[in-house]
Amino acid sequence: MTLSWTAAVVANGFAMIVLLTMLLDFHGKQRRFLLRDQVIFKWMLILNLVILALDAGTYVLNGQTFAGARTQNLLITTAFYILNPLMSVLYAMFCDVRLKTPARIQRRLTWLYWLPVAVNTVFALLSVRYSLLFRIDANNVYNRGSMLGVSFALSFLLLGISFVRILVHHCRYLAANRPDTFAFNQQTLTSLMLFPIAPVVGGILQSYWFNTVTVVWLSTVIGLLIVFFNTQNAEIYSDSLTGLYNRKKADSYMQSLSQGNGKGNGVYLAMLDVDNFKRINDRYGHMTGNKALKIVADSLRAVCDRETFLSRYGGDEFMLISRQGGRVKLEGILNRVEKNLQEYCSVNNLSYSLSISAGIAEGDENTESIDALFSEADTQLYRSKTKLKRRAEDFQ
């Protein structure tokens, strides 16, 4: 007696449509100049498509009695098992790029990544004769092999290792107190950590409860969706240099405040910029200027809490928005940032000094709009620089 293939074909077909939609959208926006992580993610989508197609084929062929049905079932099932660990390899390579692992180390790791694939391939090929991972009996019915757990372990090994690596990097970042520490985009890190969870849960469900569909590869589609949407959002709303939110996100957030609270009640906004930034750029070059902006951004990130909106608004300008704690809170943040920058310049013997000037505006019943709040903060910033006689130096 064979299991019905309808549920598997319908489920896999729907998942394949989702993957094709992501692949077409991704390819349409990134036709040229693909980065390495984008190429790897593209192949992850393609691989999942192929595996789902092979999986659907095994369900359709299972128990069929037409001429050559058993041979086709053996070929498709063998190919299915050979490809299973490849997703883990691509995921590990994808994480290497996102974690900015040096190229020489990436090349060395890639050779190690292929070891589980090689071992699994040998087991899959031997299974045609010795029924290690699977067995197709004389009636062309699929049965699990006695060593199927080995294939599961080889397929999930790199997922677990990569998850631990990401978790370690995440913990190191949270524990670091230096403002020059590389700031991983938290949204991207979260998506990388969530990706392995979906197929692992799917594999557990597959092992004990599900026989009509292959849940593990349907679950992988969910993991890819998480990475896809988080990556898209990060590219749209993140500043590529500092990792902070960009001006587009800041404008959207300000618009949402305007819609939710037309008069800006309880909204506190600070505009700040880097003193003498033009002189740093002109004297030491744009690479040094970029490093200075990252130092300021990381110092801001280290001081601000989760309730404070933080973005690089443009050039050397940054924006803080808070709805709790008021002016006192923002002034405290700015003072701590100024202190951190002074300490950093002293400890690292920088050839230039870093400091900030800021203007703070408070929304109340007299504030007509968020735009007016922004304008007031910008005006206060100008007055702050004039008072400290720094603005003249910026335009030398």
Image (cartoon, rainbow, N blue to C red):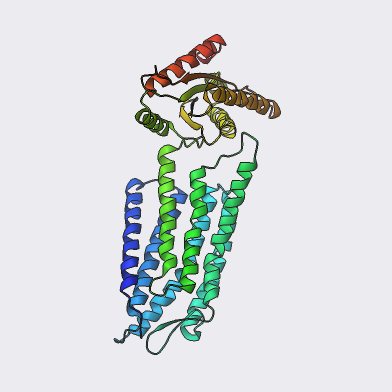
Would you say residue 396 is visible in this rendering?
no
129, 210: nearer the viewer = 210
**Residue 79 at x, y = what percent?**
42, 73
* 370 vs 49: above or below: above
123, 215: nearer the viewer = 215
* 157 vs 166: above or below: below
Would you say residue 133 is visible in this rendering?
yes
**Residue 376 at x, y = what percent?**
43, 17
What residue do we see at 55% from left, 69% from top? Answer: 154
* 5 vs 44: above or below: below
What residue do we see at 49% from left, 84% from top? Answer: 131
* 225 vs 16: above or below: above
Q: Picture quarter containing residue 12?
A: bottom left
What residue do we see at 54% from left, 24% from top? Answer: 330
Asked if residue 61 lies left or right of residue 134, the reply is left
**Residue 28 at x, y = what percent?**
32, 48
What residue do we see at 44% from left, 42% from top? Answer: 234
- Location of the N terminus by quadrant is bottom left
